[in-house]
Image (tube, coloured by chain):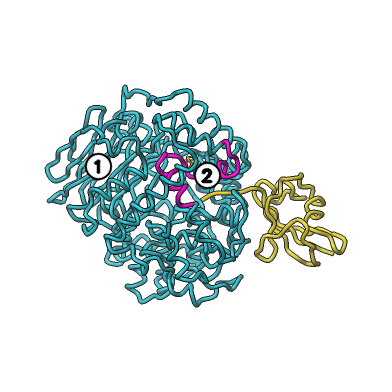
Chain colours: A cyan, B yellow
Amino acid sequence: MDKIVRVNMTDKKVTVEPVPDKYKGKGGRWLTSLMVSDEVPAGAHPLGPNNKLFFAPGMVTGTHAPNSGRISVGGKSPLTGGIKEANAGSPFPQKLARMGYAALVLEGLVEDDKRWLLKLGLDGGELLPADDLKDKGTYECAKMLWDKYGEKTAFCVNGPAGEAKMAMAGIAFNDPEGRPARYAGRGGLGAVMGSKGLKAIVLEDENAPAVKPKDPEMFKAGQKKLADAILSHDVTKKGGALNSYGTAVLINILNEAGGLPTNNFRTGVFDGAQKISGEALAEAAKTRGGAGMMGHSCHPGCIIHCSNVYAKEDGSEHVSCVEYESSWSLGANCGIDNLDQVAELIRMCNDYGVDTIEAGVTVGVAMEAGLAKFGDGKGAIELFSEIGKRSPLGHILGQGAQFTGEAYGVTRIPTVKRQGMPAYEPRAVKGIGVTYITTPMGADHTAGYTIAPEILSVGGKAEPLSAKDKIGLSKAFQQTTAFIDSCGYCLFIAFPILDIPSGFDGVVETVNGMLGTKYTGDDVTRIGDEILRIEKDFNVRAGVGGKDADRPPEFMRYEKLPPHNHVWDIPDEELDTFWDK
Amino acid sequence: MKIEVVLYATLTRYHPEEKGNKPFSVELPEGATIKELIEKVGIQEGEAKQVFIRHKSRRPDYVLEDGERVAIFPPVAGG
Ligand code: SF4
């Protein structure tokens, strides 16, 4: 990975340059956050000519290291106004890495309302007119792309929501079967892509060489340690929870713990939880047969297989994938306990090209505003279709939960830095609340997944309801995560490597083997911390990094959450210590 | 005393009537603990990772009370 490709949408030029020294040996989130910080003026309008969009495979992506096919996408977020990194697992970054690209940079702005497609090959690329894809849903686009360029290509595509510059728009990457279903979802980066008139990127990687580690033996040893840890840990092994039930296996346990946000964060228990759980998905896959399956994977080389395909009653494919977050956001959070309706909402999100978390939190807030009734799946589908119609209401909803709540005078808006909260109630699980509040990303569970010790008893044990010692816990998780996001590893390797030390060593060894570095376990924390501070610094310059930005939504301070009847009780002064050295 | 049990994920295979997540009741002597309940249901050693009663995670030596509802999980994770 020694090249950077720059795509300038103003003059339609595609240029390839060598990776400057400063960026050598960096990948994924490390690289995108560094480049955003270096190249995007903090005051830039997210949809204006000075914002840029960066795509970077991880440091070990493209190799045979298990679960390493992730891509980071970075830029200034139209949703939060701060820095953003969203990542997805797909064959796309594996090909991009093998083609030798450390990063793809999208810059400039189109002057007209035309759409473009970037066709990228080993030696550079060209921008082709793509008005035939204009305003089309991602499913139709995906089919057109594979029909035209062949099923060996990888692609990413922007949906109609991104073209309409909606702040909940994500960017869809293909899964191994060509579904536009793997999302760099959060923070509205699809709107940035839309503002630049780029509808899709197609990678033609024929004859791309294998990625060669600098020290193949060290790399191999690390790869084996990591694979052994993944395949022996109870949650990631074959027949384990993730493989058998998908991520939605969490629905029931969060519900039992009283931390499953329900009806727009009014309570932590949902009566219909079992009906939208991983167990229900597995049951449907079994009884309906046909296209439905558990144990699907988002890219070749994944050895966990947490993804799934959900089938309709007649066995025909409905959608992939019903994740925990999506089943919660469009299910429990809206009071909807009908899996077919939830699946339909997820399919609509994928087709419009929006983040399912922001979508569900927005519908929850809209229900709060009286635009539909909690529990009314049909009403939710009807309401959500306004986004597809691009009606004025659709444009309001498309801007996300905060904007929608403000438009309708709602006070219970579960966001931090204007980004919708994911599927864990901060009043019932305090550490994850610290992560939501302090991460430079806006409310984001993946930034520092303290749920592992707080709820799952993985990587130690912490009392979820206690306000004590949660700053340090979240910080440690955030640092390690920033490093994992830079490697290109799927975050779910965290479960085995938290419990099995040799698995953690394996991660470090694959990176060292790949790059010829001598990183130790301490460097993981140090580099992770460095990445967080680059991001925080950008936010401070952009005006969303001050102390006022690192605060919970006010209603959580005074509204007690059943069943534990806790409020958010970590003092602000304590939150402010997060960035102390 | 009577305890209501709910099994989740891979543990559903221990349901006496193979009814997945459906709650069922178990008869136990007064003063029985979670550990004893798990043995009675027939779950193999080490397979039950988390037990929730009234929305709180409980330890194996927790002494059960008549009528309590007990949710038992194997190791699970996600995101
Ligand atoms: S575990 Fe899931 S998210 Fe991770 S690489 Fe595999 S399929 Fe993708």
Examine the rendered structure and indicate whether residue A379 appears above or below residue A410: above
Q: Tag 1: Cα neighbours inside 10 Å, few (<14), some, or many (≥20)?
A: many
- Is residue A83 shown above or below A149? below
Q: Position of residue A432 (x, y in %)?
A: 50, 59
Q: Is mark 2 within 8 Å of ligand 1?
A: no
Name the residue that disc number 1 marks: A105
Horizontally, residue A174 falls left or right of residue A41, namely right
Q: Residue furthest front?
A: A581
- Quarter containing the N terminus of chain A: top left
Residue drawn at (21%, 33%) of the image:
A17
Q: Is residue A481 magenta?
A: yes
Q: Amino acid at mark 2?
A: Ala
Q: Nearer the viewer, residue A102 or A315?
A: A102
- Which residue sits at x=41%, y=62%? A420
Q: Which residues are magenta?
A: A477-502
* Picture coordinates of residue A253, whole percent (x, y): 61, 56
- Picture residue at 39% right of the left edge, 63% below the top: A382
